[in-house]
Image (cartoon, rainbow, N blue to C red):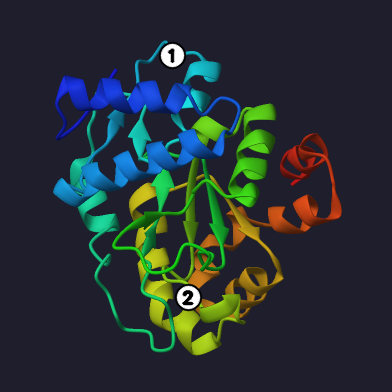
Amino acid sequence: MFMTNSTPEEFQKLKHLAYQVEHFLDKNRERLRLYEDALLKISPHRVMILDGNLDEEEGALLLYGTLPFVKEDEARTDVIKELWAKKDCEACKGVVYRHAMGTGNLKPKYMLIGEAPGVSDGKRPLERVMGYGPTSIFLRRALYHNRLLLRSWFTNILKCSLPNNTKTSDDQFMACSTHLLKEIELLQPQKIFLLGKNVQKYVHNSKHFNQYRDIINSIVHPSYCAYKGIDYKVYASYFTRS
C-alpha cells in the first residue's frame, strides 16, 4: 500500500493519524485533516493505492481520511487532475469558495451525490466531500455496515458552500453540473444515489442526465436520519432496497 506523489514517511504518518480516528476523537480528526491539507497544498494529485487483499476493516479506517484511492496498481492521477481541475473555479456568485472536491474509489461501483458542502469550516483552499462532521461519520458507518464504503465515490453537484447553508438555486446547480457530468463520464459508476430532495428535484428535472436515468436512485439525505435519530444500520438498508 502506498500513495502517489508522496514519500513513504508522509504516507506512514497519514496511516498513523487515520488509525487514531477509530473512536472519532475531535483532536485526532483535526490533526488528520490538517496533515491532509498540508500534503494537498504541496501536491493535490495524490492517490492511495490499496493492496488487492486489503480487508474491509483496515480500508475503512484509512478512509476516515478523505483522499481518493484505487484498489489496483493503477494510480489514476490523470483522472484526479481532470476531476479536480475546477478547484479554483469562481463561476458561481454568492457562494463561499470552499471547493469540496469528490473523493473515494476511483473505479467505483456506486456514486453518491449530495447538494453542496457545509459552510461550518469557512473558506478553505481545497476540501474533500467526505469530511469529519457528524453527517459524514454517520454515512461512513452506514456504508461500512452494508459493505459499500470501499466501492463508492462521493461528490456534490455544487462544489462550493452556500452562506449559512441557504438554499441552492437552479442557476448555481446549472453552473456546476457540467463538473458533475464529467465525473460520471470519467468514473462510469454502475449505480448513482441522489442524496436529498434538492438534488433529486434538480437531476430528475434536468435533461442533461437523461442518459443515466436507468442507474439513478433517490435516497433520503443522511443528515435527516442523523437529526431524527435513525440508526445508521437502518439507513444502510435504504441503499440495499434501492
Quarter holding the N terminus is: top left
| Residue 220 visible to an observer of this rendering | no
Which secondary structure lies at badge 2? helix
Q: Position of residue 83 (x, y in %)?
A: 29, 56
Give residue 205's position: percent from left, percent from top. Answer: 62, 80
Identity of the residue drawn at 53% across and 65% down: 120
In the picture of the structure, the residue carrying the numbered disc 2 is 208
Q: 31 above or below 71?
A: below
Q: Is residue 38 above or below residue 170?
A: above
Which image quarter: residue 179?
bottom left
> At 48% from the left edge and 24% from the top edge, which residue is drawn?
20
* Residue 132 horizontal/vertical position (percent): 52, 46
Above-or-below relation of 108 to 154: above
Question: Where residue 54 is drawn, which disc sits there?
Answer: 1
- Left or right: 7 with respect to 179? left
Residue lying at 31% horizontally and 83% vertically, measured from the top left: 91
Q: Nearer the viewer, residue 171 or 161?
A: 161
| Marker count (numbered) | 2
For marks 2 and 1 on the same chain, the one whose residue lies earlier in the sequence = 1
> In the rendered image of this protein, does residue 207 appear above or below residue 24?
below
In the picture as drawn, the residue positioned furthest to the top comes out as 53
Amino acid type at mark 2: His
* Residue 227 in view here: yes
The three-letter amino acid code for the residue at tag 1 is Leu
Residue 213 is left or right of residue 62, and the answer is: right
Q: Which mark, residue 180?
A: none
Q: CA distance from mark 2 to mark 1?
A: 37 Å
